[in-house]
Image (spheres, grey):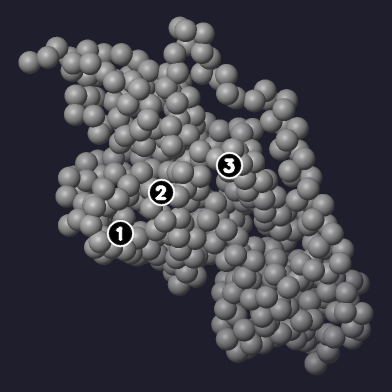
Amino acid sequence: MSKIKKTTLTVSGMHCPSCEILIKNKFGEEKNIKEIKPNFKTQKVEVSYAGALDRENLNKKITPFGYTIVDPQNGVNVNSGKEPFSKRMMEAGVVILAFFILYFLANEFKLMPNLNLSGKISLLTVFLLGLVASTSTCMATSGALFIATIGKMRHKDLRPALVFNIGRVISYTFFGFLAGLIGKVIVVNFQLGSILTIIAAILMVVLGLDMLKVVSFFSIFPSVITGGFFERVEKRLIGNPKQTAFFLGAITYFLPCGFTQAVSIYSLSLADPIKSAATMLIFVLGTTPVLLALGFAFSLTKYSFYPILQKVMGGLILVVGIVYFSNSLSVYGINLLPTVSSINEETTKIENNVKLEKENQIARMTVDSSGYYPNSFTVKKNMPVKWIIDGKNVFGCQGYFVVPALNISQNLKKGENIFEFTPKEVGTINFSCGMGMYRGIFTVVD
């Protein structure tokens, strides 16, 4: 029996817990390797093995995924391929500036409203997050698990591959539904729902910075629990991939992936099981095409344009996160960015849209796929207001209605919704959809 030896390898390119899982999977394919302990923070991998360790072969296994075994003792620096921080900041700044210029131009020429129909911008963003996640190293483990098991089956039967992805779709949708149920219980007031939405936006910003190589997502938001669960379940299933393809796909939800965490928190903030399930479904469908392409995401890392593509996509995710963060704050009257769906110009010109009936002020508003109309009202202080909202189309972002000053945070129902309040102070009362994409205002006067 060969004596067990230990060595520590320096592996450049690791930046998250998913990287550690992928390295363990690929190194674990060598039969003489007994134990692997990777640490993405130190870029070190401790390996226990019997006999000889074929470093060249190990390197071939991981280089398609963007990792490389280096030897610092021979003068090779683990960070030699890493660009200086100043250069990374400059490149990130150029990418971000370009996207903001496009955003402001689209806003100026009235091109953005077309994206807001039925709140579709959020679903498009979620699908985009899925596409980006499927080509990033944070989602690489899911593909690595697929290639190491289902992808090794050399036959024409595509059913295991399809079942693997069906397992992912059902799992993500189920946990989205579960997040909606939990959210419905815990999001009892707008403050908590708003906080969750803001956290999701912050996660998107940090994910963008991570892809721009400015910061490391998991150095800020560690994810140890899901990674450990994934590894424990994976070990039980990986030995028989054909029979366990569905469950192998299902457990990929527990990968320590920042994209999944961001979308899951957003799903929680929706506080609606159906909408939350649909959100996670859209996200996982965005990740599916690349996985069905049998490793295209990993061959993509070999090409010289991949770092540029990653930075462009990172810049886009960062800008979207900033926009969502700004929208989340706007319901409090804090506008960080000019927006396309604040107070409609046409409705601000409408006078006398509040009618007096006996001692009540009657404000009527319609909710449809384009938002709220009218969305600007002027009411008198210390006089009761009866706010009648006709929900013609409440499926979408506009259907989740929040008014912080009145402690309103709920899904509008189809048909008539009535809210009554008496304004006590001169000023403004802001209202919006849950994501701040559609907004309105009550101006209270003496």
Residue located beneath label 3 in the image: 306
Q: Is residue 244 above or below residue 364?
A: above
Disc 2 target residue: 295
Using a 10 Å C-alpha cutoff, classify the residue at mark 1 as few (fewer than 14 neighbours), some (14 to 19) or many (20 or more).
many
Seen from this angle, which residue lies furthest bottom?
358
Q: Quadrant of the N terminus?
A: top left
Secondary element at image label 3: helix
Q: Can the viewer see residue 288 in this picture?
A: yes
Quadrant in the picture for the C terminus: bottom right
Instruction: Give the residue drawn at x 45%, y 55%.
Output: 290
**Numbered badge on residue 161:** 1
- Residue 335 got which mark? none
Q: Is residue 174 left or right of residue 113?
A: left
**Marks 2/3: CA distance?**
15 Å
Name the image quarter holding residue 383. Answer: bottom right
Amino acid type, label 2: Gly
**Disc 2 from disc 1: Cα separation:** 12 Å
Amino acid at pointer 3: Tyr
